[in-house]
Amino acid sequence: MADETLVCFTNCHLALDDGSQVKRDLWVDSTKGIILNAQEAFYTTKKRPGKIVDLGGNILSPGFIDIQINGAYGFDFSIHADDESYVAGLKMVADRIVETGVTSLLPTIITQKRALYPKLLPLLSQRSFPGAATLLGWHSEGPFLQLAKRGAHAEPLLATAPDGIRSFEDVYGAENLAKGVEGVRMITAAPELDGVMNSISELSERGVIFSIGHSVASSKIATEAILNGARMITHLFNAMPQLHHRDPAIIGLLGAGGPYSTRAVPSASKTGHATLAAITPLSLDPSLTFKPAFGVPTPPYVGHPPKAPSISSQKVSEALNEMVTPPQTPDGASPSLSPIGKERKGLKGMTLAELDEFERPFYGIIVDGIHSHPNSVRLAYTAHPEGCILVTDAMSFLDPHLPDGHHDWRDGRRVVKHGDKLFIEGTDTLAGSVVTLDTCVRNFSLFTSRPLSYAIKCATYNPAKCLGIESTKGTLRPGADADLVVLDKNDGSVLSTWVAGKKVWNR
């Protein structure tokens, strides 16, 4: 007996969780909106799909997941006029972004005035609109960011966390950080800032994903953040120290884990195990000051960081506008531009056996060929393929239909769009990303010389696993949500998008 609620996708190649492809049919229940075990469904119900969709040998993938996106189609997630128009803007983005293959997204807000967080975060709770992409929750990028790596984040709004977790609650609202709140919550912060490191474990216990970003953390501090529960790195390579062979800093986490990542000859503890405290004796003292370079302020400072001079002559991205900082020095002694919390968790007494269990973090990477060189993308993926997550970090100008040319922006300024590049009018300064996630998928395959299925994994299963939702999103396993995207087998372009087993967009 045929059941019209059952849909069978046939003549297709399924993109699996491990990055492989297999030619196999896929059954979905369009009423329940889930993927079925075809054999089990047939023998249990004795029913066959009433709708057969022949995909012509193309690729059937889980829907893409973008976990860092600042806006799209003219709507900015960080701008709030009133609740009604804000929710309407969310729905508009969710309705339209499916054309890029995205079926789930994590709206990202940049550093704001404190009064705005209690208004924005409740509106960004997990929600679904019929026939549209799912809004998974919120990603707050700031205000606990390093001054020297602030990017486009407003200097006067940056902050440290002198009261630890209470400082986070004061900014975001205790109710928004409470344990058991539904939906994804992610915070990008610099672990070297006063009070931040000691808040990571508490945030993690409450279900908040901590991502290291806009930071000058040394290798030691970055490693400590991971041991305390940090799970991700925000836009790898951007807004962080660049790779130094003696202190690879945040980027070095991709190669971390095991005794080989430590230095010097370990000494034995009372238990007979070598301890990390013995291996990495150097630490950053908050009382230390360093000779300023290019006008960079020296620590310590309390509360909001002091204003630093701008460097207008640099040709950099406004979205990633970094001050010139001194070169990294080895062994974790790189200059810190903000105070370091005195208390440390995780590193002292860490045994080499425990280091073997070190779990390298996930990392977001913007694969537009602009923010990260193709060779850098290949290098990162080769070092840690299981952690790679493709993100757009897109601004409100993300729109595949937006023509090249001049467009109004903010504060009376205009931008010039040229393909995936966005410049501030009258300059050669990049104003942010406008790349779509499906373009990132295709670029990744090209840059790394990997099959498209490997790129798909970095936009589906990997972000889902990072967020802890891999049982329902980013996978074609039975029982998962039937959020799907059909990709051209030749060029990887999006042919159609399905949400909860129903077609919502077709080329």
Image (cartoon, helix red, strand yellow):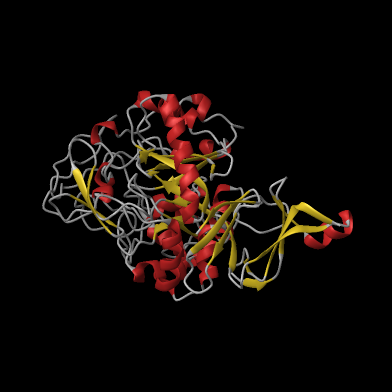
Q: Name which quarter of the figure residue 444 lies in.
A: bottom left
In this rendering, is residue 260 above or below 209? Answer: below
Question: Which residue is rendered at x = 48% and y = 37% of the image?
Answer: 91
In this rendering, is residue 379 above or below 326? Answer: below
Residue 226 at what x, y percent from top left?
A: 48, 50
In this rendering, is residue 230 above or below 444? Answer: above
Q: Is residue 438 left or right of residue 481?
A: left
Query: Dividing the image into 4 quarters, which one contains the N terminus?
Result: bottom right
Q: Name which quarter of the figure residue 191 lies in.
A: top left
Which is nearer the eye, 233 or 482?
482
Tag count in the figure?
0
Q: Is residue 403 left or right of residue 126?
A: left
Which is nearer the eye, 14 or 283?
14
Residue 354 at what x, y percent from top left?
A: 58, 56
Q: Is residue 245 left or right of residue 343?
A: left
Q: Is residue 372 visible?
A: yes
Question: Which residue is rendered at x = 50% and y = 74% of the image?
Answer: 490
Q: Name which quarter of the figure residue 196 lies in.
A: top left
Question: Which residue is rendered at x = 35% and y = 26% of the image?
Answer: 81
Which is nearer the eye, 350 or 67?
67
